[in-house]
Image: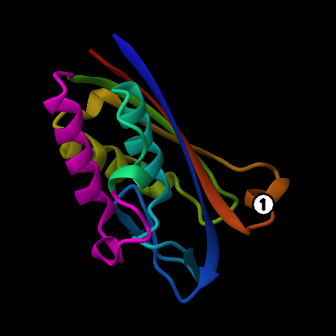
Amino acid sequence: MRIGHGYDVHKLVEGRKCIIGGVDIPSKLGLLGHSDADVLLHAVSDALLGAAALGDIGKHFPDTDEKWSGADSLELLKAVVKLVENKGHRISNIDATILAQTPKMAPYIEEMRRNIADACGISIDCVSVKATTEEGLGFTGEKKGIAAHAVCLID
């Protein structure tokens, strides 16, 4: 068994969609990034790549390559899963936490779990997504950005 950890952060700005966990969340502010800036799926992807010792998403989908401009992070996650499986591993579970003061995540958690499970080819019972605020502290608490952590187990 191997454990992986992923972390990602994106700045909140006007004029961008707020896509988290593959869900387009209604919000006045969205996430800035080269792809769709899905902070949660990027953290999950990095956890999986890390567990398989395959680097990070920047190595496989660099922001210097226009090919990935506006990319759908669910499709990137599916590509990561193939890389992990091609190395002979199987995903056991994923546990992720979103750190955001706004928007509220609770109404979208189950859809996020389903999206991750489907992209990874695992049961939704093997995917946990949680969200927390940071009580107004730090860049997430000040509504300047959103961060996500993810851990995974592969075998």
Is residue 71 rendered to the left or right of residue 41? Answer: left
Residue closest to the eye, 144 or 57: 57
Determine the image quadrant of residue 92.
Answer: top left
Return the residue nearer the eye: 45 or 21.
45
Point out the stretch of residues depicted in magenta: 61-89
Q: Does the magenta stretch include residue 95?
A: no
* Image vertical order of residue 21 relative to residue 12, above or below: above
Residue 31, position in %: x, y? 54, 72
Name the outermost residue toward the bottom. 15
The residue closer to the viewer here, 144 or 55, is 55
Residue 133 is situated, as x and y percent measured from the top left of the image, at 71, 50
Task: Please state which of residues 8 and 26 is positioned toward the viewer in this rendering.
Answer: 8
Identity, as a three-letter code, of the amino acid under mark 1: Phe
Q: Residue at x 33, y 25 (%)?
A: 93
Residue under the image location 73 percent in, 58 percent down: 140
Is 91 situated left or right of 104 in this image? left
On screen, residue 142 above or below 69:
above
Residue 104 in the image: state x and y as whole percent.
Answer: 58, 60
Say which residue label 1 marks: 139
Q: In which quarter of the image is the N terminus?
A: top left
**Is residue 87 one of those drawn in magenta?**
yes
Give the vertical position of 7 relative to 71 (above or below).
above
Looking at the rendered image, the quarter that the C terminus falls into is: top left
Whole-percent x, y for residue 85 in the image: 17, 30
